[in-house]
Amino acid sequence: MSWFIALRAILHREALRFVGQRGRLVAALVRPLVWLFIFAAGFRAALGLSITPPYQTYITYETYIIPGLLGMICLFNGMQSSLSLVYDREMGSMRLLLTSPLPRWWLLMAKLLAGTLVSILQCMIFLGIAAIWGIRPPVVGYFAVLPALLVTGLMLGALGLMLSSVIRQLENFAGVMNFVIFPMFFMSSALYPLWKMREVSPLLADLCAVNPFTQAVEMIRFALYGQPNLPALGWTLLALVAFAGVAVWGYDPARGVQSRKG
Amino acid sequence: MADGLSIRGISYSYGPKTALNDLTLTVPSGRFCALLGPNGAGKSTLFSLLTRLFVAPSGQITVASHDLSQSPRKALAKIGVVFQQPTMDLDLTVRRNLMYFAALHGLAGKEADARVGAALERLDMAERAGEQLRALNGGHRRRMELARALIHRPPVLLLDEPTVGLDAAARAAITDYAHELAADGMAVLWATHLTDEVRDTDDLAILHRGQLLARGTAEEIRRGMTLSDRFLQMTGEDAL
């Protein structure tokens, strides 16, 4: 029982913070919107897209990058919420969380879920703005995308949590941008399809294919059209389990590098 | 005694650097124990071990008869902690912050309401319950941290330099309150580098470079000198 009381409180707190910090929401939405309105508009002419599943007709570039931008929202959120736990003003609240008399893995997973739900809310608002802009997946897509976003958010949040627990050098967000977010985002199918990448470099295309972010984006892409993409789902789940496992290991007080903090 | 805090033979190193060396210390119920040491003495490391942020490779910590490494959750449930860092969300109200903490300890509904109300009452903060934490001054925020640490009624209270950054009046208020809690039966471990927070009748442990230099009541240890001078003499470092 006390497990669920704690889980509910952690989710509630995150929700209150989300509502209370309008600036955070605006900042989180500006990034993908800039990509959608400016980058995609400019790129539209440069990149010819053929018809590949799940699309059944020619699509605009804006339509193509929507799943990638949803992934981007989850990626930034995941990194931000996990790293802020450790490095800045949330340090105290993280310590508080870890002194709760509940299993640590449960507390970390609750925190992860809370951050993910915020990501999903932001994604839905983003999809709403895109719809106003005229980019509309089928209605079923708005529902089918929810579980895909959940798995994606959890996977990327777990990645952030893992990084925060095992890597010493990522002391600031700039480092994370350079070494995690940019490579992950650009080495994926978020901005260009993999077959396009393969024309340039098969090696790069292979690297993109094993990138869990690519798989998450493809899962979202299919879900937006109401179609399951089981290999992508499987790969993303696998990454989630691996990242979460290392994160829980990293926060184990007997082994974790948390002990670097004097 | 059984309800207090007991630390036996704890050592800890960061790589080659020893932070704590074979530390043994007990804080019985009803006692206020000041852990006095200059910066870098190992106080924060000890607090991290006591709150299980990490665990010591050797030695044993028991909290209210629960071994911290064998039954960590039972032990943690018996500890209230005031960290150096603020733990509360500035954008949430005082009550919401406290309810969050209560929930982390498995308290909800009326029970949590009552506990939070009582904690606020005890620290004369009841009328501030609906305010955002941001609206409170530094002294009041610290008081809220203390109120928070007491919600689950722990028999052991740990405070890691709780008066850092406070003015004299706020410092005195919190120090007095912690002494009252000890008088009421709690085991209180108070880490500080400020000698004026220690009273003659308090238990005192002087920590320096990971070693315990002295252990006794403050009066015994200072040997007729001021505590500040005695501390300086023992550690060779400036105390305030």
Image (cartoon, coloured by chain):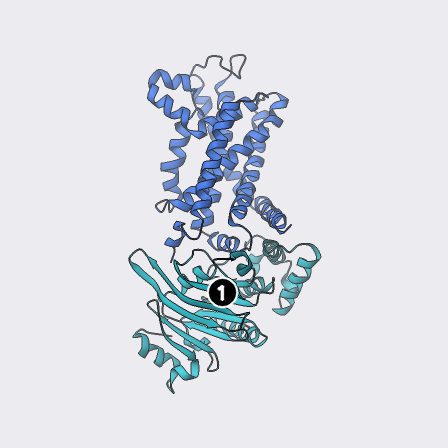
Question: Residue at the spot x=50%, y=34% of the render?
Answer: A73
Q: Nearer the viewer, residue A35 or B55?
A: B55
Q: Residues within 10 Å of mark 1 (few under 14, many from 20)?
A: many
Question: Residue at the spot x=49%, y=12% of the render?
Answer: A51
Furthest residue in direction front, as rendered: B70
Q: Nearer the viewer, residue B212 or B82?
A: B212
Residue A16, percent from left and from top: 60, 47
Residue B207 is at least partly visible in this image: yes
Q: Chain of mark 1?
A: B
Residue B51, percent from left and from top: 48, 59
The C terminus of chain A: image quadrant: bottom left
Q: How many circles with numbers are drawn on the protein?
A: 1
Tell which chain the image draws in cyan.
B
Rendered position, A51 above or below B2:
above
Question: Circle 1 sits in a helix, a strand or a loop, which is it?
Answer: strand
Left or right of B69: which side holds B105?
right
Residue A79 is at least partly visible in this image: no
Identified by mark 1, the residue type is: Thr
Tell which chain the image draws in blue.
A
Left or right of B180: which side holds B206?
left
Pointer 1 residue? B62
Residue A86, percent from left and from top: 44, 49
Furthest residue in direction bottom, as rendered: B224
Q: Nearer the viewer, residue B214 or B147?
A: B214
Residue A160, percent from left and from top: 45, 41
Furthest residue in direction right, as rendered: B110
Rendered position, A38 above or below B64:
above
